[in-house]
Image (tube, rainbow, N blue to C red):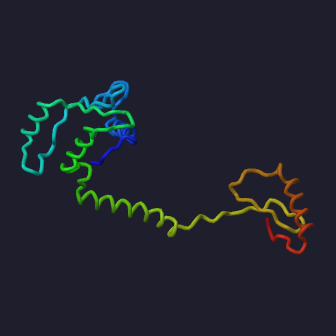
Amino acid sequence: GFEVDDSSLTQAISTLRKQLQDSTKSPQYVKTVPKRGYQLICNVERATPFMSGDTLVAEEEALEAEDVSVELPTDSHVDEVSPLKSTVTETKSAPSVAKQVKPQSRWAMRIMLVLALLIPLCVVLFTNPAESKFRQVAVYDNTPVKTPINHPDLSEWYPSIEQCVKRYNAAHATVAPVEV
């Protein structure tokens, strides 16, 4: 549980609606009351008894006796303590179901995380890429031009390749490439 102040009330209700998958058009849990605030419109049952020893039956009777609706002002100036604040404070004593994670599922999650990190690392470290085999296409200015065997035909590009190799060799005569 947590306390909600007036500045974050709209965001908190929006988050609550998302978690409950509650629509604003036809709500099942939280209804917006114009110029007043919000109203809880669903039935509420306590899953675990209070720590003080109250039973589940006594709590259900108390819930049936009182109205379950909670109205909150939407004005930014509030002189009274909001009923939601006390309601949220009461639920702090009940243990959260979402926070109770079994140790077995924690270990399973840790193992999956380690595997998710180790598998790609093993693939990168322990596999060698296949070496490409090349075929010689042409020789320009004593510079062989090679292409991978599985590469498509470059015969239309031969004039452009020849021009590039010759210009490069002319501009960089001392550092001419051994092969391209």
- Nearer-the-camera pick, 40 or 83: 83
Q: Residue at x 9, y 50 (%)?
A: 52
Near-viewer residue (47 or 172) = 47
- Residue 133 x %, y %: 68, 63
Q: Position of residue 88 (x, y in %)?
A: 25, 44
Q: Quadrant of the C terminus?
A: bottom right
In the rendered view, tell whether residue 154 sits above or below residue 131. Answer: above
Quarter holding residue 114: bottom left
Residue at horizontal 22 percent and vertical 41 percent from the top: 87
The correct choice, above or below, for 139 with respect to 64 in the image is: below
Q: Nearer the viewer, residue 104 or 44?
A: 44
The residue located at (89%, 75%) in the rendering is 174
Q: Which residue does the image show at 32% across and 58% down from the upper left?
A: 109
Q: Is residue 92 left or right of residue 119?
A: left
In the picture as drawn, the residue positioned furthest to the right comes out as 170
Q: Position of residue 17 (x, y in %)?
A: 34, 36
Quadrant of the rendered image containing residue 160: bottom right
